[in-house]
Amino acid sequence: MKIKVIVTPKNGVLDPQGKAIQQTLNSMNFIDVSEVRQGKYFEIETDLKDEKDAKKNVEDMCKKLLANLVIEDYKIL
Amino acid sequence: MKIKVIVTPKNGVLDPQGKAIQQTLNSMNFIDVSEVRQGKYFEIETDLKDEKDAKKNVEDMCKKLLANLVIEDYKIL
């Protein structure tokens, strides 16, 4: 079973990489872009068969490894 | 309007970062994890009001800057 996770910088946390992408897009004539935030995306293939178990397990992985909860939020899709 | 994009390595393209995460998870006793693929996630805030226009514009950004189409796929959410 494949579980998908998105990890994003929390609101208020600076995201210099996103800012750089926004400025680059603006300079490429995408002048309507006012903000870009960049996060990470994971596809986790697990041998667990039960979706609820698998998602609970992935939540544990987020807390322990995938996300830094001080500055990042995670969302399991 | 906020448009969300996911950029992932194409099937068959090596993803050493995902592999490293998988091995780390396995060593942390998440032994059910058989594969991890890592991608990028973008939230793009645009001044365009029309969703169709905005998504078309973001698709253009993906092709020109956000994704390397030789090795990556993009998906506009």
Image (cartoon, coloured by chain):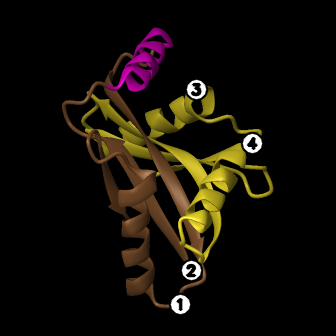
Chain colours: A brown, B yellow
Task: Determine if marks 3 and 1 fall on one subunit.
Answer: no
Which amino acid type is marked by label 2?
Met
Q: Chain of mark 3?
A: B
Check the picture and name the quadrant holding the N terminus of chain B. top left
Chief secondary structure of the magenta portion: helix
Query: Could you tell me how far apart the alpha carbons at marks 4 and 2 are, in whole angstroms?
Result: 24 Å
Answer yes or no: is residue A29 visible.
yes
Q: Which residue is mark 2?
A: A1
Residue B36: give x, y in percent of width and height. 62, 61
Q: Which residue is mark 4?
A: B71
Which amino acid type is marked by label 3?
Leu
In magenta, the rendered stretch is A15-28
Q: Is disc 1 surrounded by few (<14), some (14 to 19) or many (20+) residues within 10 Å?
A: few
Q: Chain of mark 2?
A: A
Q: Residue at x 75, y 58 (%)?
A: B11
Which amino acid type is marked by label 1?
Lys
Residue B59: give x, y in percent of width and height. 52, 38
Q: Is disc 3 surrounded by few (<14), some (14 to 19) or many (20+) residues within 10 Å?
A: some
Q: Chain of mark 1?
A: A
Query: Could you tell me how far apart the alpha carbons at marks 2 and 1 are, in whole angstroms?
Result: 7 Å
Residue B23: give x, y in percent of width and height. 66, 60
Q: Which residue is mark 3?
A: B65
Q: Which structural element holds mark 1? A: loop
Q: Between label 4 and label 3, give the one nearer the viewer.
A: 4
Residue A14: give x, y in percent of width and height. 28, 24
Q: Between label 1 and label 4, give the one nearer the viewer.
A: 1
Task: Determine if marks 4 and 3 fall on one subunit.
Answer: yes
Q: Is residue A19 magenta?
A: yes
Task: Determine if marks 1 and 4 fall on one subunit.
Answer: no
Q: Residue at x 43, y 64 (%)?
A: A61
Query: Could you tell me how far apart the alpha carbons at marks 4 and 3 are, in whole angstroms?
Result: 13 Å
Q: Which residue is mark 1?
A: A49
